Amino acid sequence: MNLLTVLPLTLVMIAGPQLISAVFLAASRDPRRSSVAYLAGAALGTLIPLTVWYGVFRLVRHSAGNGTKDSGSRHLIDWIVLVLLLVLMVITFLRRKRNQPPGWMRRLEDPRPTFAFGLGVVLFLAMPSDEVTMASVAGSLAGHDKPWWHLLPFLVLTVLLLALPLLALVLLGARAERLLPKVRDWSNAHSWIISEAVILIFVAIVLSDLA
């Protein structure tokens, strides 16, 4: 993997409640302040694990010495990610008929910026699927001896994708205010299809790296 290869994994990062929350916030009563706070929290919740995982895999690479163990570690991570993605696909399929958002998501209709910021941090810092994705990205870049700042394009693209509902609100104004609730409702009903498609893309990438 290289920098361009890992960038599509941002789709895995935002698939599910992360993007749906961004849509909810853009359709809330105070969309700009809440959305900006959410994006700041998401950035922090992504930057911290990426940096930690990068440091861990740098240590693994240096401790390996000749690189053999480092290569084995990268392949082990790929196998773990592959198994977790397959499990995630099964869970997503079993939950496909659960169209109602969880109770905490209903609070996004009138959120405080502090709640939106905390939500952004938690959704990325504590989601197992995102942790697996970030570990894979950081491990790949550190394993190929890429500098730390190569993580930043991945971070920026993740936040930019999350910002799309807010950008639509800024650019389209009243049209976006009417459109975003429809997008939110569609996402509630069909997000499992998007999630399955994104997971399949990620599975293909991991398999190509293992080949």
Image: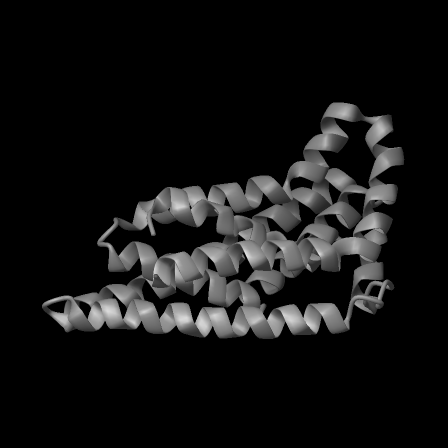
Q: In which quadrant is the C terminus drawn?
A: bottom left
Instruction: Identify the residue at image location x=57%, y=58%.
Output: 200
**As rendered, which of 66 and 159 lies closer to the eye?**
66
Tell me if residue 129 comes above or below residue 5 in the rendering: below
Is 201 left, or right, of 101 in this rendering?
left
**As rendered, which of 87 and 146 lies closer to the eye?**
87
Tell me if residue 67 comes above or below residue 166 in the rendering: below
What count of labels does the image hold? Answer: 0
Is 79 left, or right, of 18 in this rendering?
left
Instruction: Identify the residue at image location x=39%, y=67%.
Output: 78
Q: Position of residue 5 (x, y in %)?
A: 40, 47
Q: Quadrant of residue 94?
A: bottom right
**As rendered, which of 108 and 60 lies closer to the eye?**
60
Is 188 left, or right, of 156 in this rendering?
right
Q: Position of residue 39 (x, y in %)?
A: 61, 47
Instruction: Identify the residue at image location x=60%, y=54%.
Output: 198
Q: Quadrant of residue 88?
A: bottom right
Examine the rendering and report whether any part of residue 104 can be seen. yes
Examine the rendering and report whether any part of residue 13 can be seen. no
* Residue projecting furthest to the left: 66
Q: Position of residue 26 (x, y in %)?
A: 77, 42
Instruction: Identify the residue at image location x=51%, y=57%.
Output: 202
Q: Position of residue 195 (x, y in %)?
A: 66, 57
**As rendered, which of 126 and 90 lies closer to the eye?**
90
Tell me if residue 62 comes above or below residue 18 in the rendering: below
